[in-house]
Image (tube, rainbow, N blue to C red):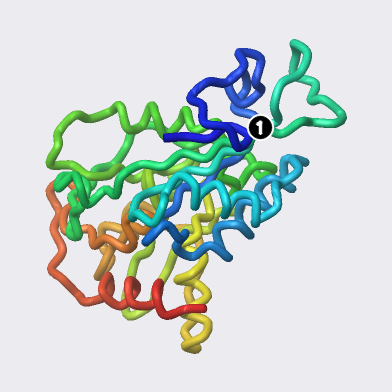
Amino acid sequence: MSLVNGIPSDCLPVEDRGLAYGDGVFRTLRVQGGQPVWWRDHYAKLARDAAALNLPCPQAAILLDEISILATGRDGVVKLVLTRGGGPRGYAPPSDPQVTRIVLFSPPPDNDPGQRVEDITVRWCTLRLGRQPRLAGIKHLNRLENVLARAEWHDPAVHEGLLCDDTGAVISGIMGNVFIVSQGALMTPDLAQCGVAGVARTRILRAAGERGMTVRMTRIEPQDVQSADAVMLCNSVQGVRRVARLEAQTWPSSGWADTLNTWLYEVD
C-alpha cells in the first residue's frame, strides 16, 4: 500500500529524479497501532537529510496524516521517501523542486520468522564503501553499494554483512549500524567520511550520554571487531541484535544487546 503525494498510487513519472539519479532521501520506521515509533527522531533525521540535499521537507503533520491513512491502527513498517521530483534531462537540479512524497506501508517483519532473529550470524563483505564526506551520514536514495554487498551471499543462515570503507575501516552493516564492546568500552564507527547515521544509533548515543557513559566514535578495524567482547548491529525496525557468529568466530551472550535495546525504548 502506498501514497504518492497523498494519492493512492504505485507509479512514478519516468522523469522523476529519484528514479533517474537516486536524488532524494528516505526513512524506514516501525508503526504500532498506526502510530510511528520514535517519530520525533525520524522526522528530525528526514528533515536534516533533506536539508543537506537542499530538498524542501514536508510538514510533519502531512506525513503523520498519510501514515495514519495507510496504517489504519495496525502494526507494521513504513517507508518515507522524498525525491526532487521531475525536471529537465541532465544532472542540473531544478531551481524550484517540486518534491515527490512517497509513503509505503508493509506488514510487520514478525510475520516472517526468518526476519525476526535476535542472535545473528554475519559475514564480511568484499565490497568497499566509497568515502564522500558531503553525503556522510545521510540516508540518500542511492544505495547501490548496499545492493551489491547484499548480493554477495545467498545462505539464509547468514543474516547480515559487515561493510568496510576503501581504507579498510569498519563502517556498518548493510542494514544497520555497528556497536562493539572492548574492555568495557562501548564503541561505534566514526561516520564522518561515509555510512548512514541511523536513528537507532542516535538514540543509543543519546541514552548513553544521559547515563553519563561515553561512547567512543572512532576508527574501528576488522581486528577490533574480531577481538571485541561483544558485537551488535542496530536499526529502527529490528532494534539491537547480538552478533553470535562472524564467519568462523563466535561470541557468548554478554548482556550488552539487551542493555542497548532497553536504552532504545527508555530514552526520550
**Nearer to the camera, 236 or 124:** 236
Outermost residue to the bottom: 212
Tell me where residue 244 appears, x and y as whole percent: 16, 59
Disc 1: which residue = 100
The answer to whether residue 1 is visible is yes
**Nearer to the camera, 112 or 253:** 112
Tell me where residue 142 appears, x and y as whole percent: 55, 31
Q: In this image, 112 relative to 126: left or right?
A: left
Total labels drawn: 1
Q: Residues within 10 Å of mark 1 (few under 14, many from 20)?
A: many
Tell me where residue 51 appears, x and y as whole percent: 74, 48
Q: In this image, 95 relative to 153: left or right?
A: right
Element class at badge 1: strand
Q: Residue at x 56, y 38 (%)?
A: 81
Q: Give the answer, above or below, for where 141 lies relative to 188.
A: above
Tell me where residue 255 appears, x and y as whole percent: 22, 77
Residue type highlighted by circle 1: Thr
Q: In this image, 137 relative to 148: left or right?
A: right
Q: In this image, 44 relative to 246: left or right?
A: right
Image quadrant occupied by the N terminus:
top left
Residue 231: name its quadrant.
bottom left
**Nearer to the camera, 22 or 78:** 78
Q: Residue at x 65, y 48 (%)?
A: 49
Q: Give the answer, above or below, for where 115 lies relative to 88.
A: below
Q: Give the answer, above or below, for where 233 lies relative to 127.
A: below
Q: Give the answer, above or below, for where 251 lies relative to 223.
A: below
Q: Residue at x 47, y 74 (%)?
A: 215
